[in-house]
Amino acid sequence: GENVEQHPSTLSVQEGDSAVIKCTYSDSASNYFPWYKQELGKRPQLIIDIRSNVGEKKDQRIAVTLNKTAKHFSLHITETQPEDSAVYFCAASKRTGGYNKLIFGAGTRLAVHP
Amino acid sequence: DSGVTQTPKHLITATGQRVTLRCSPRSGDLSVYWYQQSLDQGLQFLIQYYNGEERAKGNILERFSAQQFPDLHSELNLSSLELGDSALYFCASSVAGGHYEQYFGPGTRLTVT
């Protein structure tokens, strides 16, 4: 069945360091890969997404890379700041007739220490 | 604020009871999604509606049902509640049914005692 594995489950970095979170998906037909950030007690918010026709996408300090052959994608955060501390979820879906069933990874709790 | 509203914010009820969670999507969004978030299960997709029609189903229990009304608001009905149904239930909406950003509501925290 459809599955998304996410590693690591927790990540602790010093302010200014880089953080990398990796996800692997099982369904080779998946073609859309969003990343959500969820701060404590708040709603998940989309921070970046990538489609299968693109290998890399950047938005300021965050970037996502996709390797379709290996079926994995990664989130890279550079120059981390304390406000980056949150739980990050990767997800994968395949577009079929206007439906968008997101399968989420289990989440990575990122802690950025000043 | 995402523009998606959910009521109630908190709900405490007993096992065996039935509850209804309500979601109003962002203005102009036609698609609504329901997710369950519990401590040990992460974010689980339950069901998607697009313009009143069911479009996709996840691991939604038979005790759960949902619908989207002509004004596009949606309701998630949970019946014969069990302790394990305690979770945060999120609604999300997007402009259409494909690969568009999903905007999440603030969630409804359900506690079954």
Image (cartoon, coloured by chain):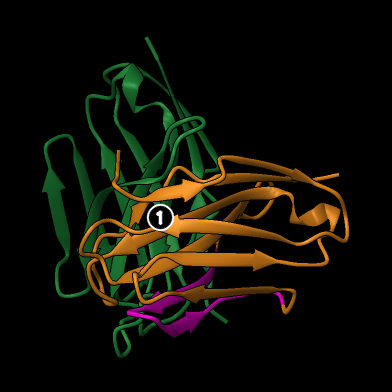
Chain colours: A green, B orange
- Residue B54 visible to the viewer: yes
- Residue B60 visible to the viewer: no
Is A101 or A18 nearer to us in this picture? Answer: A101
Which residues fall within the magenta stretch? B45-61
Outermost residue, top side: A114
Q: How many C-alpha atoms fall within 10 Å of the one at disc 1: few (<14), some, or many (≥20)?
A: many
Whether residue B53 is in magenta: the answer is: yes
- Specify the quadrant of the image occupied by residue B43: bottom right
Residue named by callout 1: A90
Outermost residue, bottom side: A97
- Image quarter of the N terminus of chain A: bottom right
Taking the spot 52% from the left edge, 47% from the top edge, the residue there is: B7
B39 w.r.t. A85: above or below: below
Q: Is residue B19 toward the left or the right of residue A41 in the image?
A: right
Which percent across, then down, holds residue B14?
86, 49
Which percent across, then down, holds residue A15?
32, 16
- Amino acid on which the number 1 mark rests in the picture: Cys
Whether residue A32 is in magenta: the answer is: no
Is B23 or B44 nearer to us in this picture? Answer: B23
Is B10 or A90 nearer to us in this picture? Answer: B10
Q: Is residue B29 toward the left or the right of residue B83 in the image?
A: left
Is A32 or A45 nearer to us in this picture? Answer: A45
Q: Is residue B40 toward the left or the right of residue A77 in the image?
A: right
Q: Chain of mark 1?
A: A
Which percent across, then down, holds residue B44?
57, 62
B8 w.r.t. A32: above or below: above
Taking the spot 36% from the left edge, 48% from the top edge, the residue there is: A36
A97 w.r.t. B61: above or below: below
Taking the spot 11% from the left edge, 37% from the top edge, the residue there is: A60
Which percent across, then down, holds residue B11?
68, 43
Name the dominant secondary structure of the magenta segment.
Answer: strand
- Image quarter of the C terminus of chain A: top left
